[in-house]
Image (cartoon, helix red, strand yellow):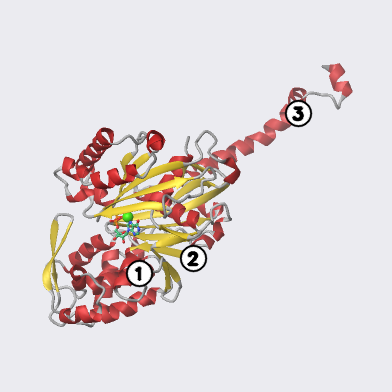
Amino acid sequence: MTAKRAIGRHESLADKIHRHRGVLLVISIPIVLIALVLLLMPGSSTSVSVIEYTMKSHEGGSNSRGPKNYAVIFDAGSSGSRVHVYCFDQNLDLVPLENELELFLQLKPGLSAYPNDPRQSANSLVSLLDKAEASVPRELRPKTPVRVGATAGLRALGHKASENILQAVRELLKDRSRLKTEANAVTVLDGTQEGSYQWVTINYLLRTLGKPYSDTVGVVDLGGGSVQMAYAISEEDAASAPKPLEGEDSYVREMYLKGRKYFLYVHSYLHYGLLAARAEILKVSEGSNNPCIVTGYTGTYKYGGKGFKATASSSGASLDECRRVAINALKVNDSLCTHMKCTFGGVWNGGGGGGQKKMFVASFFFDRAAEAGFVDPKQPVAEVRPLDFEKAANKACNMRMEEGKSKFPHVEEDNLPYLCLDLVYQYTLLVDGFGLKPSQTITLVKKVKYGDYAVEAAWPLGSAIEAVSSP
Ligand SMILES: O=c1[nH]cnc2c1ncn2[C@@H]1O[C@H](COP(=O)(O)OP(=O)(O)O)[C@@H](O)[C@H]1O
Ligand SMILES: [Ca+2]
């Protein structure tokens, strides 16, 4: 020991620690104390959920796999069921199946339309399953993962009824298909999962994954039953994220994609999808006339097994009054907000920042804009501003039912009585809910161009990427 010390430079680490143990003790006590404080502090890393989600960088490849990996993903949405079949090469690039980059099929209604008949509900997927499976080469079927993700429709049905339906779907897959079902392949996606997949889908197709977070785009997905918003935030903002409300998912997910770590702010609002929001807006006027219903219409709106009085007021629809009702239904109310800044219903807004600069807004935002005639449904994307929704709303709220067909020739007949409501809600959600400026340019998206092709801008691609890149 003494000899070693005399040599000095050759002193081992253990000896050094031993010799300086006094100093080390003095230094380490405050460090341990600070670490403890940080760990126990509210809003620290406890509000960040880390998801096992690793997308390898290009050179990583999927070593043990074949040159082509298929994935079959069912989107059991509240208003319909769809299936997507994708094929990836070893670099996790999409490769064409016949002449498209995905097989995409859809039908209506969704699984939740059969709440008391799980078998019939599951059987509604048969035609989609058969066609999807047929598109996967026979020898690859046993290694091709199939997933079924149910969204707001089954979420709103409640645990028992939805679990029965999911069980029937599991049995259908087992009996009828040779595709690979992993554990948890058939589930109700939680809303934050759905929002994260949507973000991955769009950023994957735009090839922004792997770039700094402020180069990625934010997404909004307006479904029938729920609406999700997701965008990447800085590590500092993630660290100071508030804890979620009781029973809510955490606000921030950590994801590793193409060699980079992202902190994704994501929130899903159940009951605020477009079709569910109609019910919320009609509930505000509770049994009396509603200023959002197109002038001259008398009827009942059915949603989730319930009926809501949908009758125009005698003075007709009114943009301003409908706006007030929509703001009320959204619970845009600062007194509910216990965080720095909220969207609506007391939900933290994520703090904004570079990942929210560009917003890609999907599903019913695109569809209604197309029906209302201010975007071309044949184009995959359209740049608009929230005030385009308000302008169209103004026209819809000022017409009479019988003028509907000529003023809005592309609107489906069943949607006509609700056109003022839908457009006012969409404007209100973007501006009063999500806090966008009425004049901010946003991208309405149905499909995203990927090379010479265009791919559906929907969450299943994010799920497929996870399925083929997990071990
Ligand atoms: O793959 C897709 N491509 C384009 N639009 C889609 C796709 N899947 C769903 N949508 C849009 O979402 C709307 C309905 O949402 P959905 O039925 O999925 O409700 P949910 O997400 O609340 O369960 C559809 O009318 C359609 O506009
Ligand atoms: Ca959906």
In the rendered image, the vertical position of residue 192 relative to residue 285, given as above or below: above
In this orientation, which residue lies closer to the viewer: 182 or 428? Answer: 182
Q: Which is more N-terminal, label 3 or label 2? A: 3
User: Is residue 244 visible in this depiction of the protein?
Assistant: no
Percent x, y of residue 150: 29, 47
Q: Nearer the viewer, mark 2 or mark 3?
A: 2
Circle number at residue 248: none
Q: CA distance from mark 2 to mark 3?
A: 54 Å
Point out the quarter of the image occupied by ligand 1. bottom left
Percent x, y of residue 14: 74, 23
Rendered residue at 48%/52% (across/down): 264
Residue type at mark 1 is Pro
Residue type at mark 2 is Lys
Circle number at residue 20: 3
Determine whether, in the image, residue 211 is placed left or right of residue 384: right
Determine whether, in the image, residue 172 is placed left or right of residue 19: left
Rendered residue at 40%/43% (across/down): 71
Which type of secondary structure does the marked residue at label 3 adopt? Answer: loop
Q: Nearer the viewer, mark 2 or mark 1?
A: 1
In the rendered image, the vertical position of residue 461 relative to residue 403, given as above or below: above
In the rendered image, the vertical position of residue 354 relative to residue 59, given as above or below: below
Rendered residue at 37%/37% (across/down): 138
Within 10 Å of disc 1 (Cα), the crowding (few <14, some 14-19, many 20+) is some
Pointer 2: what residue?
Answer: 358
Q: Which is more N-terminal, label 1 or label 3? A: 3
Percent x, y of residue 415: 21, 69
Pointer 1: what residue?
Answer: 377
Determine whether, in the image, residue 292 is placed left or right of residue 221: left
